[in-house]
Each structure stands twice: as C-alpha cells, then as structure tokens.
Image (cartoon, rainbow, N blue to C red):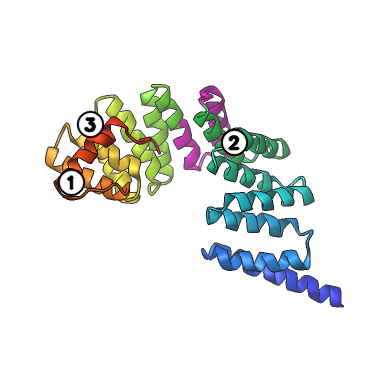
Amino acid sequence: MVETVERLRIQELLEKGFSLQAQGNPEDAIACFDQVIRADPGHAVAYLRRGIAQSSLGRHELAIKDYTEAIRLSPGLVAAYTNRGNSLYALGQHELAIRDYSEAIQLNSEFAPAYNNRGNAYRLLGRYELAIRDFDDAIRLNPREGTAYNGRGMTHLVLGLHELAIEDCSEAIRLNPSFAAPYNNRGNAYRALGQHDLAIRDYEEATKLDPKDEGACYNLASTLEHMDTQKALRVWGRYLQIAKIPAAGKGWIQNVFKIKKNPQNTVS
C-alpha cells in the first residue's frame, strides 16, 4: 500500500512538472523533477525532462549531465540523445552533436527532428551534401514542418543556388507564416539575384516577426542604403540598439561604418 501511494505521488509530481514546463515555468518544473529524482533515483524520464527545462534556461552543461544520466538509465531513450545533441549544438560542439543525432536515428530511423538537427550541424561544418541529404529525409518524414525547408534553403543559399533557396524558404513560410528566419534567408537570396525590392520586403517582415533579429536588421539597413538613405539610417540606429553597440551623439554613424567592415553573420 505504501509503495502504491509513493508511486502515485511520484506520478503526480511528474505530471505537475510537465504542466509547469508547458506553461513556461521551467524553474518550478525543475523543482518537481528534483523531488521525483530524490524519491526514485532511477527515473530516466525525470532526468530527461529536467534536462529539457535546464536547456530552456540556457544551462546546457547541467542539461547534458541530466541527458547523460537518462541515457545511462534507459539507453533506448531517443529523446535523450536528441536533446543532448541540441545542447551540444548550442555550445558549438557540432561533432559531438552529430554523434548524438546519429544515435537517435539509429534507434528510430523515422524520427524527423534528429535528421533536421543533424542537417544543421553538418551545414555549420560545411558538409553541405550531407546536410541536404538530412534535410531531404526530414522533409520526407514530416513534410508539414517548415524548419527543414528553411535549413535546406540556407544550405542552397551558401552553395549559390538562389532559386532553390527561394523555393525552400517560400515553402517554410507557407507552412509557418510567423517563422521569421526563412523571410531573412529568402531576402538574402533575392538580394543576391539583384531583386532588392523583394529582399527589403522580406527583411521588413523578418524584423517585424522577430524585432531582436540582428541579422535581419543588418540586412535590411545595408540593402536600404541603395534605395532610401534616410530610412537606412533609421534602421542602422535600430540595429545599434539591438546589438547593444554604443551610439552616443553624432559619433553613432562611425559605429555603422565599423560594423560594415566587420559584419555579423547575416543568415538565420
């Protein structure tokens, strides 16, 4: 009877943690998962979910420890490999991330997010053929998810395949019109083709959807310079605020020229 009551309490804590996480309250969710782990140190799902909560707070080192313990307790837990890969990716450890995504795919070859995320890691490492292959698989497995189209579009953009990049980014936008990144990336493709009006329209939409997107704001300002100098200066001012670059008095415009000599990464 006591064991049954304890199991019920653990389940209630676990469900409460799930609910708090879904409500965007990771700190309180972590407190619930802590209690579950104290009561049942072998509870792999509690480690997994605590890791996810830690990741959402940017605590990737702590998250990796939790995912690793979840994997030790339950070696077939696909989500633990995928999420550990995500934290490694966030820390710039792309080779290790690829290893985890590959393990997740080996465990479940139909799991589209692992292909998509591995594709992004390959792209950042310059392994474009492997990246496109993974994005193709992610799209095949889940054609209604826009992130893989955006990732493949970015890869096509890097390869100079601008028309293909536009097609992919347009599909990503069709699937999720509130997804800012493909607007910025499609804008880059339009600009490369000399279609500045279309590029500006996309950059403006990207900055509207994500006002803190430094890359889209930079792209908008630099493209406007060829079209509308006064508007370009206003956008440069906004960029300096987003990037937290000092812009005191008349000297702020000098900062713009410094930025232009050393631009930020302008893809999303």
CA gap, disc 2 to disc 1? Answer: 41 Å
Q: Amino acid at mark 3?
A: His
**In x, y percent, where is residue 99?**
66, 34
Q: Which residue, given by chain and number where applicable, does mark 1 sit on?
A: 234
Q: For the residue labelled by badge 1, is the local secondary structure a helix, a strand or a loop? A: helix
Bin the neighbour count of mark 3 within 10 Å (Cα to Cα): few under 14, some 14-19, many 20 and up. many
Relative horizontal placement of residue 31, taking residue 192 as reference (left or right)? right
Query: From what the image shows, is residue 20 above or below residue 53?
Result: below
Residue 196 marker? 3
Q: Which residue, given by chain and number where applicable, does mark 2 sit on?
A: 115
Relative horizontal placement of residue 98, taking residue 248 as reference (left or right)? right
Q: Earlier in the sequence, mark 2 or mark 3?
A: 2
Which image quarter is the N terminus in?
A: bottom right
Q: Earlier in the sequence, mark 2 or mark 1?
A: 2
**In x, y percent, where is residue 101?**
64, 38
Q: For the residue labelled by badge 2, is the local secondary structure a helix, a strand or a loop? A: helix
Determine if residue 202 is in view.
no
Q: Earlier in the sequence, mark 3 or mark 1?
A: 3
Bin the neighbour count of mark 1 within 10 Å (Cα to Cα): few under 14, some 14-19, many 20 and up. few
**In x, y percent, where is residue 103?**
70, 37
**In x, y percent, where is residue 209?**
34, 50
